[in-house]
Image (tube, grey):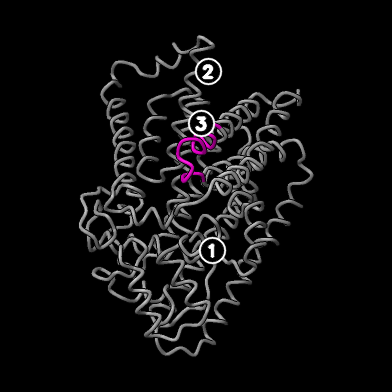
Amino acid sequence: MTFFKYLNLTRAYILFLFLAPSIIYTIFLLNGADLPKLSVLASERFWIYLVEHKRAISHGLLTWPGNIDTSVIYIERLLVRFILLPFDSKIYFIIDSLISSILFVGSISFALKRYYKDYIKFEIFVLILLAIQPLYFLKIIYFDINIFELWWSRNLVSTMAFVFFLFGIHELFFKENVTYSLFFASLLGFTHFYSFILFLGCTGIFFIYKILSKEIDILIKGLRKKFIIINALFIGLILFALINTYLMQGSQDIAYFFDRYTPSRNENLYKDLLLHELKYLFPIFFLTVFFLFYLKTLDKVFKKALGLLILVVFTAIIISFIFYFIFPDTINIHFRIYIIEPLLLLIFSLIFFNYFKRFLIPSLVTIFLISLILPYNLINFVSKTLMLENKEIRTVHSYLYSNDISDCQCTIFDPKSHEFLKDLSSELSLEDYELEQWTNALIHKELYFK
């Protein structure tokens, strides 16, 4: 009974960390308040995800979210936008965080029961550890000490991408259930492109391994006759997602948007970006190989989990090199922060807690104390907001929330956002931090890579 009591308290605390920032935003914004400077993580919730939601309502779910005449079919984050479409944009942040928190807690708990059932006793510790993500959290605190949101609460897409990947790769690697794996792959195709590409790469390497080890017949059994139609449907959805994304990125109509996200960069920068990722991926890869082959006392399920992690990290390394030599503008950190780091944390936390049980309580207390930085910073954010003397909306975040943006050129998705920003700058005497956040929200990386 005590276990369930603390488990429910842990779930409630995670729910609070997810929801508190969104509730605070909503209360202030509904009352016409302006907002102080936001972190990059918090800012993106406005100029990417809120904009996509409001434009989906005004323009249509499959329509490009910018005010431009184009035939592009927009499917990036389509599943997320579809789920949130029925809700009013005024309560968007609250609904987004509520669904994210329920999906996160429920899915992680179910995954532990399905794939690691002998270790469900560590559920409390895994949930809080995975929610806070200490490695990511400490890095983000280093760059912005005022952060007050979890990684997962940035948008429903982050939670859905990891959950779909988690179940899909475990169904393939643990259960060798091709049909379920294809199902989750198709969901990823309409949720997050880079997680989708990583999953397809893992699937391809896994099949090659099975062919070379002459175990492919086992997988073929997963494609039994009665499932041919549904498997064909999933494969069709996967191909559609791939082809449509290729056509969208090659469209001249919206080339301006990709210039903002991946502007022209030089060869040295491409190399630096690749090396930046490899300095994380290679240590993770070799550390996992070491644990797999040198710790003889590992339980069978942990060996399988480490093998799964090796597959994912190896695939990320291969794809990163392919990006570098073929399409270097696509080199990014998404493989690592969306999938690899939380997957690493999940697997190694189970192993660590299983073999070092005496560290369970100290670890839980430490993570809880670290996480208190978030509500502390949120209180400071509330204080700063209350101290603002602005009687007009000046920041990009309040503007995008409070105004009808269906016909303006005021978002990163609009081709003439430069002109909007220029007119705005001459109309309002913006402070440096206000102008910086407007510029980042409307032209993004052109601010840094001119």
* Tag 1 residue: 16
What separation in Å lies between label 1 and label 3 (alpha carbons)?
A: 29 Å
Which residue lies at the image location 50% right of the left edge and 72% below the top edge? 436
Q: Residue 326 in magenta? A: yes
Mark 2–mark 3 Cα distance, whole angstroms, equals 16 Å
What amino acid is labelled 3 in the image? His
Q: Nearer the viewer, residue 245 or 10?
A: 245
Image x and y of residue 5, in percent: 61, 54
Tell me where the magenta segment starts and ends, as one range: 318-331
Residue 61 is tagged as none
> In the orientation shown, which residue stands out farthest toward the right?
358
User: Which x, y percent locates residue 337?
Assistant: 56, 48
* Residue at 45 percent of width and 50 percent of height: 103
For mark 3, what is the residue? Answer: 170
Q: Nearer the viewer, residue 423 or 152?
A: 423
Please report whichever mark, 1 or 3, sits nearer to the chain's N-terminal start.
1
Residue type, numbered disc 2:
Tyr
Amino acid residing under circle 1: Phe
Q: Residue, x 65% and y 67% (percent of image)?
A: 145
Q: Nearer the viewer, residue 65 or 236?
A: 65
Q: Residues within 10 Å of mark 1 (few under 14, many from 20)?
A: some
